[in-house]
Amino acid sequence: MKITKTEIEGVVIIEPRIFEDARGYFFESFSEREFAEQVCDCRFVQDNEALSSYGVVRGLHFQLPPHSQSKLVRVVKGRILDIAVDIRKGSPTFGKHVAVELSAENHRQIFISRGFAHGYSVLSEEAVVEYKCDNYYAPDSEGAIAWNDADLAIDWQIPTDKVILSEKDKQHPTLAECKQLFE
């Protein structure tokens, strides 16, 4: 696999080696050994999958310690813009974000370590997103930041009037208003 470091430590892009022939293609989407050698040594304990339509924005979500999560995200159908926001207090990149397009065609994955808020927007008619987590979901530890926080200046690549949000995602505070973040 090809690993590309981003401008923010703790977020990397992973591209698998793809073997194509007349039958189609094959690739290894995850190897614990290679991942530990090239990215980090973490143990994934939960896999999640979400189906969403064009314009859906999910996020920006995180879990606080002791239930914080690292995530390995990929798209198996469609196309998304995946976002990771650094919410580690004291980090030189605090409040900065990485945006990467993930699709069924490019087979990219993004690894987001603990200490980041995560979200994505659906750019295709629909998308199926799968992601691995290294800790179990714990509702009492969840937090979130407003998707449209002006200070974050995220271009979700969706016109504002086409954005579809859950009722919960419409009510999150800005990063500046968040009372609990990562130390």
Image (cartoon, helix red, strand yellow):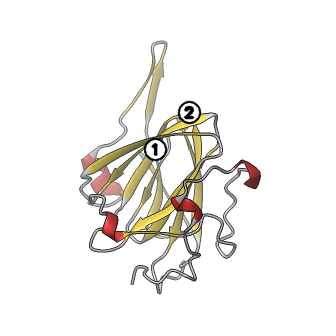
Q: Are marks 2 and 1 in contact (CB under 8 Å)?
A: no
Query: Who's the residue at 49% across and 61% down the image?
Result: 118
The residue at which mark 2 appears reads as 105
- Picture quarter with the C terminus: bottom left
Q: Compared with residue 94, is residue 102 higher up or lower down, i.e. above or below?
A: above
Q: Considering only vertical position in the picture, is 70 above or below 124?
A: below
Where in the figure is residue 35, as x and y percent of width and height? 32, 52
Can residue 159 be seen at all in this image of the molecule?
A: no
Q: Quadrant of residue 135?
A: bottom left
Name the residue nearer the viewer: 12 or 132: 132
- Residue nearest the observer in this picture, 170 or 156: 170
**Position of 37 compared to 102: left or right?**
left
**Relative side of 139 to 176, left or right:** left
Say the numbered circle drawn on residue 74.
1
User: Crowdedness of circle 1 by 10 Å Cα count: few (<14), some, many (20+)?
Assistant: many
Disc 2 or disc 1, which is closer to the eye? 1
Where residue 178 appears, as percent x and y from the top left, is: 51, 80
Q: Position of residue 95 (x, y in %)?
A: 57, 76
Q: What is the number of callouts on the image?
A: 2
Q: Amino acid at mark 1?
A: Arg
Place of residue 70 in the rendered image (x, y in percent of width and height, measured from the top left): 36, 61
Query: From the viewer's perspective, is residue 123 above or below residue 98?
Result: above
